[in-house]
Image: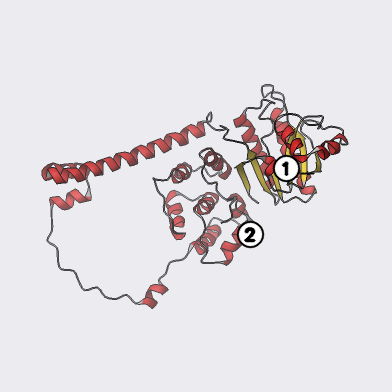
Amino acid sequence: MPFEIVRNDITKMKVDAIVNAANPSLLGGGGVDGAIHRAAGPELLKECMALGGCKTGEAKITKGCRLPAKYVIHTVGPIWHGGQNGEKELLTACYRHSLELASAYQCETVAFPMISAGAYGYPKDEAMTVAVDAITQYLNDHDLTVYLVVFGHTEFLTGKKLFRDVQEYIDDVYAETHVQKNVEYARERLWHSDERAALELDQALGSAFGEAQAAPKPMSPPKAASMPDLDDMLKKADKGFSEMLLELIDQKGLTDAQCYKKANVDRKLFSKIRSNPAYKPSKPTVFAFAVSLGLNLSETKNLLQKAGFALSHSSKFDIILEYFIRSEKYDIYEINEVLFHYDMPLLGSGAN
């Protein structure tokens, strides 16, 4: 089932369970802990008092009381002491034990905050990495929809080399596109003012337009167009997105489940695509399958075309995906971290 990073107030999430980044007493505190207790009302404190606290890395569950969520899972994250005191293992345990509790109580949807990334001082980019790794590892073998809830626009990626590489690629592509547009504009103006200079420019650029101007050919009269046969055109109609996707899954030696899980796509959505040859997915969904199948850039463009899309250098979303595909980086959750930072649609996890 899908995993999605969202910006929201966790106390407003309409899910089966929300996770509380609690302190060991479970009696409330600041940050997310205090916000959840305030929203849930005094009934939550009464339930927590009966639990007898909670150790770091472990998790306990209560009812959601006045919250939209049915349950609150309380887990205690580690305090950051430099990273050499088992912080990563304890933080991973927080996510794992919380998810195990959610499964035991038959929850289908769970929302996490960023555990330990506030007052406990865990570096935000490292906390994000631990959260994503722990959640996605659990989802490989379990059917849950999990949300990682971030309040506001927190910078998780700016210190990472990956982010810097993506930003550099975006800048390069935008610069190249801008230069091309400027050259075209200059060429067009030159043809209106100095044809000889324009011709020399076209020849220097090696453009087809310049070659045509250098050696003009007499135009022959157009031939009478014959009407195409409709039945013949229909017979030659190309396969659609659904058919091509299923063929690619077989070619890559994947099962359906392996493919839609790697694409971060819901099983129900995949069933719609499989059962409806005319299904038209969203662009992020097409990219999600391209990533899950490890397609190269040419194959990705072809798959996009089957769904009625094209890769555009006018779209920052497309440029980011092009960077990852060219670099053969096919970790969909890593891609989604970058897309999340740029306020772009995430891959998979959507409704279409």
Does the CB distance between marks 2 and 1 fall below 8 Å? no
Crowding near the residue tagged with mark 1, few <14, some 14–19, many ≥20 C-alpha atoms within 10 Å? many
Image label count: 2
2 or 1: mark nearer the eye: 1
Name the residue nearer the viewer: 154 or 338: 154
Which residue corresponds to mark 2? 268
Give the Cα distance between marks 2 and 1.
Answer: 23 Å
**Which residue is pictured at 51% across the width and 66% down the height?**
278
Residue lying furthest top in this view? 81
User: Viewed as shown, does residue 201 lie left or right of 13?
Assistant: left
Res 199 visible: no
The amino acid on which the numbered mark 1 sits, given as a three-letter code, is Ile
Q: Position of residue 272 (x, y in %)?
A: 59, 63
Residue type, label 2: Lys
Against 312, residue 270 (above or below) is below
Res. 217 image quadrant:
bottom left
Q: Is residue 178 above or below residue 29?
A: below
Percent across and percent down for residue 31 are: 70, 31
Residue at 82% x, 37% y is: 42
Q: Is residue 8 left or right of residue 202?
A: right
Q: Which residue is mark 1?
A: 18
> Residue 22 in the image: x percent, y percent?
76, 33
Is 111 or 141 nearer to us in this picture? 111
